[in-house]
Image (cartoon, rainbow, N blue to C red):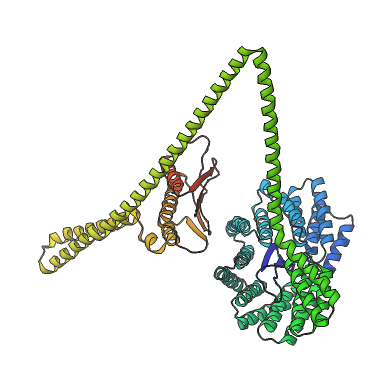
Amino acid sequence: MTILVCRGNAVILIIITLSKMGTFIRSRGLIVLFLGLFMRSLCGTAQSLDSLENLLSGNSLSSEEYLTVCDDLSWGYLDHDFGKSRQYALLGIERAKSDKNPLMEARLYRNLGVAYYMNSQMDTALAYLNRSLEKAVHLNDEQLEAAVYSAIGNLHNVSGDYKEALTYYLKALPIFERYNNKDRIRSLLGNIATLYFSLINLNQAEKYYMELEKASEEANDLYNIGRAYEGFSKIALKRNDFRSSLEYSEKAAEIFHKGGYKSSEAIALQGIAMVYYLDFKDYAKAKEYALKALKLTQEIGYGADIVGSLNILSNIYFNEKDYVNCLNSAREAIATDTTDANVTTNLYANMVRAGIFLNNHQETLEYFDKYRRLIDIRSSTEFERAMAELEKKYQTEKKELRIRNLEKEKRLHFIIYLVSTFGLFLFLLVLYLRTKTIKANEELNRQKIIQLEQEKQLIAAQAVMSGETAERTRLARDLHDGLGGMLSAVKLNLFDMKQNVIIEEEDVARFNKVMEMLDASIRELRRVAHNMMPETLSRYGLKSALNDFCNNFRNVKFHYFGTEQRLEKKIETVIYRAATELINNALKHSGAETVNVQLVCGPDLISLNVQDDGKGFDTAAETSGAGLDNIRTRVAAVNGSMNIHSAPGEGTEVDVEIKIL
């Protein structure tokens, strides 16, 4: 998969290439990071970076100029020299602290975090990115804040924590939209598409890649067009549409080659090689493209990238029955980098298979032992972790039991001593313990009663809500089909009567007025029936119903994320009622100019967020109104929760989450 991080006019491209065992498949496994920079006038070439280094070594720069050069150098060296990127970021941070320039300090912390991210040191990267985010929020620099959100989202995406990645992407996206930052919006479209591809949700991934392609064509952004083509190629490969995959990979490689994006071009070439050896069985052609990819990755110099190309070559050589080169490529890859267990497993498997055909019995046995140990380690990691947790729990319980036994023995000796010397004191002690036990039992019973009462209220709320929903549905149907039909029939009969009866001129106006009032009554009847139970909700589901409702207001924006699926009718009704009530509250009471409504549908959680930029209120001082209490009760009845975040002058945000059991 491909992840894009933007900074000004610079772009960081992160590509995750995946393989497993005998074939090279982009579905799980090897994570390889690539970096490509473009359109950076000061950092576009090694010569310009050298010029900046010479400029930095002089004494003629002001503090602001010095920090700007450090910023450019730390960012410019990201693609090929982690050491220098880190060095100049740290130099700039030290100078920014000394000169009390928190903005540049925040920017340089962001650069340092991305540098560690590119070097696969994720924990350190996250620490520096969080430090940059803290300062950006304190400075109220929303664009830097959004850029850091996007970078943290990429980190979680690469690490496989897709829920967290989506959370940070959705924090960054509205900020970029507010500032109309189309470059960053395109960047996020590609990243979200990559996320869905990682989740094997090919339809959603294809949808976002198509949006990326459209937006990039409008902006004449050739790089992102190539990125969209690379995404289409991966999707086609997953669907075994090898010819389409080859066509898109060739288009992407051509674009990346013309633009000088070596890392991106290498990945596209690997995609071409895969099609030639997986489908066409043209191993010579596959080897040609794989060698080109290897050359580019060797020029970039990152070990994990090189291993990805060598792994493809090893697979091709094995299929060609060139077992010597298969073994040599695997050896070279093992010597270069073994951080990814999936790729290392595939390489050891190739070495074992090639060794068998080459009759290298002793060496083959050694490779087989390494392969088996790696498989054992990977398969037993979770078991060992679980056993360690059980052992820890056992030792803790054992220690607590021993403590309790010792305490019992001590108490017994103490009681015997007291009985022999202080009988009266023992009596008082027993009486005290009995009273304490009775109080404890009373408290326990009180808690049980409260719990039963809460369960009773919850069941009652569910019954009331089910009855109310059924009654609303029945009334809406009766009003629409019964009374609505009768009024329509009255209108038709009046119209026919007008055609057959001669009406005096002075009565025509009154007749027309009656017809207008009848039309208004029919419209009002339909509106009331729709509000009781929207037909769109019953027929098309929650997304369509909320979208229709929000479209009735010019300042209400609706965003939907996740898979389109029908939910349980009761849950759809609760979410729809909660959303409409919250939107009406925001429009009536907060004085908001904009209301953002966001619905995220996951496999086991539905999240509704309604945010406005109105006057807000003090949640600690004000109690909830009847409307909010009703929403909270309805949500609790379907195993959900509601949280309100607001402050005077800062708007209001309400989160509703419902777990799908």
Residue at the image point whose x is 68% and y is 20% from the top: 414
Q: Nearer the viewer, residue 402 or 95?
A: 402
Q: Nearer the viewer, residue 262 or 297?
A: 297
Q: In this view, does 58 lie above or below 318?
A: above
| Among the 4 quarters of the image, the one containing residue 396 | top right
- Rendering coords of residue 312 (x, y %): 74, 77
Q: Is residue 337 above or below residue 168?
A: below
- Rendering coords of residue 423 (x, y %): 62, 13
Residue 340 appears in the rendering = no
Residue at the image point whose x is 77% and y is 69% from the top: 371
Q: Is residue 459 above or below residue 77?
A: above
- Rendering coords of residue 92 (x, y %): 81, 53
- Rendering coords of residue 431 (x, y %): 56, 18
Residue 285 as seen in the image, left or right of residue 598:
right
Mark count: 0
Q: Nearer the viewer, residue 80 or 315?
A: 315
Residue 120 appears in the rendering = yes
Residue at the image point whose x is 35% and y is 56% from the top: 533
Q: In this view, does 89 lie above or below 410?
A: below
| Among the 4 quarters of the image, the one containing residue 46 | bottom right
Q: Which of 120 and 82 is in front in this view?
A: 120
Q: In which quarter of the image is the N terminus?
A: bottom right
Residue 513 as seen in the image, left or right of residue 411:
left
Residue at the image point whose x is 44% and y is 38% from the top: 452
